Image (cartoon, coloured by chain):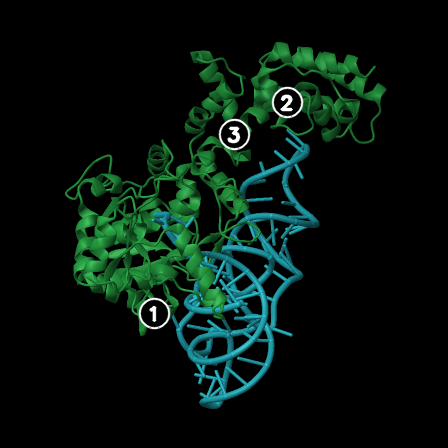
RNA sequence: GCCCCCAUAGUCUAGCGGCCUAGGACGUCACCCUUUCAAGGUGAAGAUCGCGGGUUCGAAUCCCGCUGGGGGUACCA
């Protein structure tokens, strides 16, 4: 682990970083976190943040995924200085488009010419056979590393195969001996080393002419002036190949920082789109505030000090340094996120929360779409009653349903309070009905005054009276504060429900 | 299997050789407030700093081994 000062020492000139998602599906929160760290790094050091689409996987391409990714990033508040949607000095920012320009082919050819790569005519079937032959020869299967039989072919042999129309890939000619190492900002600048013999001849350009990630990202990073590569730790094992490519191409290496993965809640593996409900758009659907998500995600692997957790975007930008990013993986903790979301919701003015709640009310069918002005004002009136109880905005319809729907049936069990019975409860409710009927002004203050007086005259405990009226008015044992609830419900409906409840237990 | 990375309470984390009888947060429990539920307040339980060796006057902090976890092992990223 390295201190801030160490890291600062390494970051002097202008920085340029990028987030380069593959449009193979929606963006899950782990991806957003990686994007966020890049963005924070750029903003903290006053550099640029680039968005680039790495759509070199023709088989897994998903239409619409790119738009979804862009939407997710914008939602949490990440913006970019250059990208596919806004262009920039290094456009295009979509790799399939860059491939059409011949960019990757050019460098593959350079590598071929310098002898760092070779045309490999091995078909998938032959690949299998090669592996089988290795095992059959008595070698340990796990030691197998792909080496094309054609890696040292003469120009004539290559020409002949090409003339025969045999398809080929271009592979990196990995040195058989030696060690490749690199350092990583997050791992304390220590050298990570791997023996070249443990590496295989990586495909750089596919048969289709499309580059693999390894070639494409590296060429683009170089061409786009990327100074720091901040990416997920799943890239650590392939980083040595990247080092070889920088050297072979004669390019200066950027600085690397591999951020830890976010593990699944049970700790068994990293977050996955298939197994975990972590698509970013699911969170705005459920009513997470982007500020809360931003804050939570920033804390997944990064911390400011020993106690500060709630921080604004600006504060996080100001405080973020790569040196305080953990090397060990974080664990996805939805409870913590939810708690934080509640904190952010509570920090908002009730009027703002009411506006945020409207879509959920419409979605639940409690308010007809489009809402009328009186619907808006009613929701604004109700919001303070549940404001501090919300952890996700989607909880609102359930909490407010009884304001919009009649109570279907009363459960005597809920209506009858401690140390009460059906008859006494019915009597008490009738008395409450009479008392409420006599309230001149239907206000919170008047209602409280009247009902507290009734507690006195009836000689019951506050909880017994208020509990029964609460169930009568709402149909449930858990609801917002009683006087506010009755006031918002209105005289007519309140009286009708209290009468109905009394009748229900006779 | 092989290669790489990581290792402080159930979880997220602070800790950078003496300030640590290991701090904060989520979660859990109790109490206070109180008409229920929340919110808020107070407090508690919970970590022999994964284990074992070293280095040092002194180690959660440095080194080694082991164990455990994670990642990688594709013409996927």
Which chain shows up in green? A
Q: Quadrant of the C terminus of chain A?
A: top right
Q: Residue at x 33, y 33 (%)?
A: A67
Q: Colour of chain B?
A: cyan
In the rendered structure, the answer to whether residue A130 lies left or right of residue A178 reads: right
Callout 2 secondary element:
helix
Categorize mark 2 by other alpha carbons within 10 Å: few (<14), some (14-19), many (20+): few
Is residue A420 positioned above or below A18 on the image?
A: above
Q: Residue at x 32, y 69 (%)?
A: A189
- x%, y% of residue B63? 43, 80
| Chain of the residue displaying label 1 | A
| Chain of the residue displaying label 2 | A
Q: Residue at x 44, y 11 (%)?
A: A372
Which residue position is annotated with label 2? Answer: A449
Q: Earlier in the sequence, mark 3 or mark 2?
A: 3
- Front residue of A200 and B71: A200
């Amino acid at each position: 682990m390295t201190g801030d000062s160490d890291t600062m020492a390494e970051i002097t000139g202008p920085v340029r970083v990028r987030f380069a998602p593959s449009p193979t599906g929606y963006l899950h929160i782990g991806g957003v976190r990686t994007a966020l760290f890049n963005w924070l790094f750029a903003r903290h050091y006053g550099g640029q943040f680039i968005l680039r689409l790495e759509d070199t996987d023709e088989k897994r391409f998903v239409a619409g995924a790119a738009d979804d990714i862009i939407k997710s990033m914008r939602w949490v508040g990440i913006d970019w200085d250059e990208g596919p949607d806004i262009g920039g000095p290094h456009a295009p920012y979509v790799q399939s488009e860059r491939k059409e320009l011949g960019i990757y082919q050019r460098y593959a050819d350079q590598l071929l010419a310098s002898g760092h790569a070779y045309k490999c005519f091995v078909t998938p079937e032959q690949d299998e056979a090669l592996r089988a032959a290795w095992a059959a020869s008595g070698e340990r299967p796990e030691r197998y590393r792909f080496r094309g039989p054609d890696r040292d072919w003469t120009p004539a042999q290559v020409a002949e195969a090409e003339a025969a129309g045999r398809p080929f890939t271009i592979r990196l000619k990995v040195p058989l001996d030696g060690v490749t190492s690199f350092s990583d900002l997050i791992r304390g600048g220590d050298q990570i080393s791997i023996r070249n013999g443990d590496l295989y001849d990586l495909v750089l350009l596919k048969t289709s002419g499309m580059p693999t990630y390894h070639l494409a990202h590296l060429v683009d990073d170089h061409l786009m002036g990327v100074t720091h590569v901040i990416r997920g730790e799943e890239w650590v094992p392939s980083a040595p190949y990247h080092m070889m490519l920088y050297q072979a191409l004669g390019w200066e290496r950027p600085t690397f920082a591999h951020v830890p993965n976010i593990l699944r809640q049970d700790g068994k593996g990293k977050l996955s789109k298939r197994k975990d409900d972590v698509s970013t758009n699911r969170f705005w659907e459920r009513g997470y505030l982007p500020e809360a998500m931003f804050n939570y995600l920033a804390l997944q692997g990064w911390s400011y000090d020993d106690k500060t957790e709630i921080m604004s975007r600006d504060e996080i930008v100001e405080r973020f340094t790569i040196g305080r990013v953990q090397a060990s993986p974080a664990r996805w903790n939805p409870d913590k996120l939810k708690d934080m979301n509640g904190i952010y919701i509570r920090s908002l003015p009730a009027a703002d929360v009411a506006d945020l709640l409207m879509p959920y009310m419409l979605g639940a069918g409690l308010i007809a779409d489009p809402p009328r002005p009186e619907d808006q004002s009613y929701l604004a009136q109700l919001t303070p009653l549940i404001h501090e109880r919300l952890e996700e905005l989607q909880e609102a319809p359930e909490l407010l349903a009884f304001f919009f729907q009649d109570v279907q049936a009363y459960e005597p069990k809920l209506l009858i309070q401690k140390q009460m019975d059906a008859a006494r409860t019915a009597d008490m409710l009738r008395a409450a009905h009479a008392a409420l009927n006599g309230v001149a002004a239907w206000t919170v203050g008047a209602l409280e005054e009247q009902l507290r007086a009734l507690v006195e005259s009836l000689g019951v405990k506050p909880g017994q009276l208020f509990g029964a009226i609460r169930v009568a008015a709402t149909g449930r044992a858990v609801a917002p504060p009683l006087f506010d609830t009755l006031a918002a419900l209105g005289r007519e409906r309140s009286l009708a429900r209290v009468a109905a409840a009394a009748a229900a237990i006779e």
